[in-house]
Image (cartoon, rainbow, N blue to C red):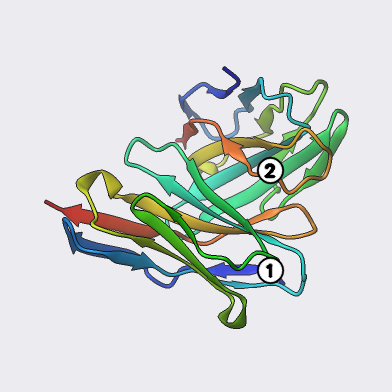
């Protein structure tokens, strides 16, 4: 069955370290998204991609970067982790067509703690 | 600007009661899509429903029903005869022609046995 996975599921790191969260989908979806979830804020968009080599900034992109070298993966990198980036991170994917407004399907989430 | 408001932060009901979760949205687009997701205590986000702006017909799926009213910019979600397994955080979301999702802040539902 097609799915979307995230790794690691839990991560503890120290302030200033570089951290990469992995997202892998086997839906053959063109569109992939990264969100963070914080109490009182719901889900906020960090970065998104509509296809290979395409990346775009979302609402809360400062301190984060992504790259899309293939259809299946969209890794999220925290260049220099800060305590304010302690959060739960969700990856999502949608649509076999570019720029579609198809339903987004979410991965299980990664709980990141920055000490 | 696009915005989704879920004014109810927390709701508690006794098992078997009906409960309605409110969702109000703002968009200038005439074509848009509305969604509901469920986040149970285990943490994953589960897709429940997708509606487009041209289809105001109400939807029923088992104990779940959705009422879409463009006149009031609302897309409310009703659970009939609630069960303990319905306890979760529920998110309403809007997707417009910009292809991004805008989520509300969620409503935490607790069903008391």
Residue at 72% of width from left, 43% of height from top? Answer: A47
Q: Is residue A105 visible?
A: yes
Residue at far top of view: A1
- Relative placement, left or right, of A11 versus B103 is left
Q: Position of residue A104 (x, y in %)?
A: 63, 42
Badge 2 element:
loop
Q: Which mark is residue B105?
A: none
Residue bearing the label numbered 2: A63
- The C terminus of chain A is located in which quarter? top left
Distance of mark 1 from mark 2, alpha carbons? 24 Å
Q: Is residue B7 toward the left or the right of residue A74 in the image?
A: left
> Within the image, what quadrant is residue B111 found in?
bottom left
Q: Are marks 1 and 2 in contact (CB under 8 Å)?
A: no
Residue named by callout 1: B2
Dot 1 and dot 2 within a common chain: no
Residue B112 located left or right of residue A61: left
Residue at 26% of width from left, 64% of height from top?
Answer: B18
The location of residue B28, given as percent across then percent down, is 75, 75
Residue B3, relative to residue A32: is it above or below?
A: below
Q: How many marks?
A: 2
Q: Residue furthest right?
A: A53
Residue A94 at what x, y percent from top left? 69, 37
Q: Please say whether residue A84 is visible from this viewpoint.
A: no
Chain hosting mark 2: A
Q: Which image quarter holds the N terminus of chain A?
A: top right
């Amino acid at each position: 069955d097609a799915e979307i996975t995230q790794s690691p599921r839990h991560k503890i790191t120290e302030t200033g370290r570089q951290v990469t969260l992995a997202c892998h989908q086997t839906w053959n979806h063109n569109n992939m998204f990264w969100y963070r979830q914080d109490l009182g804020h719901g889900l906020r968009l960090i970065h998104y991609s509509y296809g290979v080599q395409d990346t775009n900034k979302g609402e809360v992109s400062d301190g984060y970067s992504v790259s899309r070298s293939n259809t299946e993966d969209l890794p999220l990198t925290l260049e220099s982790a800060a305590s304010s980036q302690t959060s739960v991170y969700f990856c999502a994917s949608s649509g076999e067509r570019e720029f579609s407004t198809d339903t987004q399907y979410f991965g299980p989430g990664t709980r990141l703690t920055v000490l | 600007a696009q915005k989704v408001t879920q004014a109810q932060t927390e709701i508690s009901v006794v098992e078997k009661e009906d409960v309605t979760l409110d969702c109000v949205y703002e968009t200038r687009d005439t074509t848009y899509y509305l969604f509901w997701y469920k986040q149970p205590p285990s943490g994953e986000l589960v897709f429940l429903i997708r509606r487009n702006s041209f289809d105001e017909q109400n939807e029923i799926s088992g104990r779940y029903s959705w009422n879409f009213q463009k006149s009031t910019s609302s897309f409310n979600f009703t659970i009939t005869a609630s069960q303990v397994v319905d306890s979760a955080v529920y998110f309403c979301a809007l997707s417009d022609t910009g292809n991004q999702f805008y989520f509300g802040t969620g409503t935490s539902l607790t069903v008391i046995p």
